[in-house]
Structures are given as structure tokens and as C-alpha cells.
Image (spheres, grey):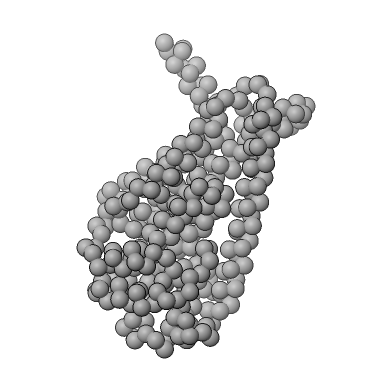
Amino acid sequence: MNWFTFLPLIIMLALSVALARIPSRLHPSWSARLLATTGAMTAVAALGTGVFVAINYAATLVPSAAAHVPEWALFGDDRPVPDAVGVPAAALAAAGLVTACRAAARWGAELRAARADVREPLDTDVPIAVAVPGRNGGVIVSRGLLHELTPEELQVVFEHEASHLRHRHHRYLAGGALAAAVLPPLRSLDGRLRLAVERWADEDAAEATGDRAFVARTLARVALAQPRAAGPVSAFAESGVVERVEALLATPPAKNAVTGPLLFMGNGVFTGSLTAATLQLDHVIASSLLALLATG
């Protein structure tokens, strides 16, 4: 084992932190894609690195068991994994896997409970609108929302929620929430992702209604709704209301028809390669060095 084992995770963490802190000038749809992809890949890289090191540490403790482990799961050298590295890696990998499983179970329970409420308006005076994905999903609204808003304002809300359902935003949110659960330093990335997803739906609603200022006023009016816990469903006035209103009152963002797809594809190839390398980097580095020596 050498420090190259942790290089993909270090690079992924650095990229995730950078994306969370640097304001993006892309359209919210492309910002959301970049953040979700990077966050999810970083979480997978963290879990993969931890499991990889833990397997090799177990092989160090019980060398006879290494014969039953696939070759791709072992380091490219026979050096033992020290206790100072193996024990924390095994503990963190186990904790990460448990956290991910608990988060998935919690999201599933939340979705099932939300789908049960889709059939009729929520009996509350608080104006609430929530997009619930899935075959039996739809849009949950409260009686307070139906009573307080005009038909035109309700159209804004439903256009916003329809955008969440049409683009399957719950998958983006699940990726960000997974990253934040497994790696707490990525909570800022999760927050920026949630804002980007809401901004994406705001822009779709503004485009559908043709009145950005009216969408901004409707959003501000519904902002008194109680925020929901972070999960795979989105409420209309869930987060970043002030920033969203300011964005709607400003010039519409560019569509990024060329730069958006190119950046997204490049980011996907880069992060995907790094994530795959969490199990094979030792072998790749060794092979590359041998090839360079042979050609030199």
C-alpha cells in the first residue's frame, strides 16, 4: 500500500469542496447536474476506498484468507497495511455503509408516507406544495395553499412542481444527501445542490408563465410554508428563498447549450475515472511506471 491509494478520494474531495464554494455561472440545470454527479461520485469513492483498504487490512491480519479474495481487490504489492491505517479505514467504511443504508431507508419511508398523502389536500392552513416522485406520486398541496393563492399563482406553483417531477430532481437530491451523510464536509455541496434544483424549477415556471416577476412574488408569498427535512422530495419554498427571488428578478440565465453539456460530460468522465481508480490505482500507477521505464 502507498499514498496513491488515497489520491482519487483526495482529488474528489477537493473538487467537491471547490464546486460547493465557487459560484457557478452556468444555468441551474447544469449546475445541479455537476454538483449531483460530483457529490455522488465522491461518496462512492470514499466508501470504495474505505472498503478497499479494509479488505487488504483483513488480508494482512489473516494472510491465508487472501487466497480467497479476488486479485482486483488486493493491492499491487505485498506490503502489509499498518494498524494505524487499517483500523480507521475499516471503522469509517462500516460507519459510512451503515449511514448510507439508514439514509436510503429514511428516504424510502418518507416517499411512501408522502405518496399516501397525494390523493387529497393536506388538512393545514400552512401553504405547502411538495413534488412526490414515482408511479403513484404527484403534487401534494395543502388546503391553505388552495385558499390563499389565486388561480394564476397556483399555476406557478404547479409549473414549479411539475419541473421537479419531469426532470426527476429527487435523484439529484438523493445524490447530494448521500454525499452529505457519508462525508459531513460535503454538506455545503448538498445545500448548493438543493438551491440549484429549486432554481432550475423556478426557471421552468418562469418560462412557462412568461412572467419572472410574478413567479418571484408567488415564491415570496409561499415562503411562509414550514420547510421540510432534507430528503428526496422538494417543497416549493424550501430553501434559499431570498436568493431565488433575486435571481428571478434579474436577467434570465443563459441556456449553456454548448458549454453545459461539454462541462457535464467532462466532469462525468473525470469523476467516473477517479471513482473507478479507487480499486485499481496501484495497478495502474505500477503499469504506467513500468511502461515509461521500458520505453525510456
Residue 116, placed above or below residue 250: below
- The residue depicted at 37 percent of the width and 81 percent of the height is 154
Q: Quadrant of residue 113?
A: bottom right
Question: Picture coordinates of residue 153 (x, y %)?
Answer: 33, 81
Q: Is residue 126 left or right of residue 28?
A: right
Most extreme residue toward the left, as rendered?
A: 251
Q: Quadrant of the N terminus?
A: top right
Front one among 278 and 85:
85
Question: Picture coordinates of residue 8 (x, y %)?
Answer: 49, 35
Q: Is residue 30 left or right of residue 121?
A: left
What count of labels does the image hold? 0
- The residue depicted at 47 percent of the width and 81 percent of the height is 126
Front one among 21 and 264:
21
Front one among 291 and 93:
93
Q: Quadrant of residue 27?
A: bottom left
Q: Is residue 273 visible?
A: no
- The residue depicted at 43 percent of the width and 60 percent of the height is 194
Question: Picture coordinates of residue 175 (x, y %)?
Answer: 50, 54
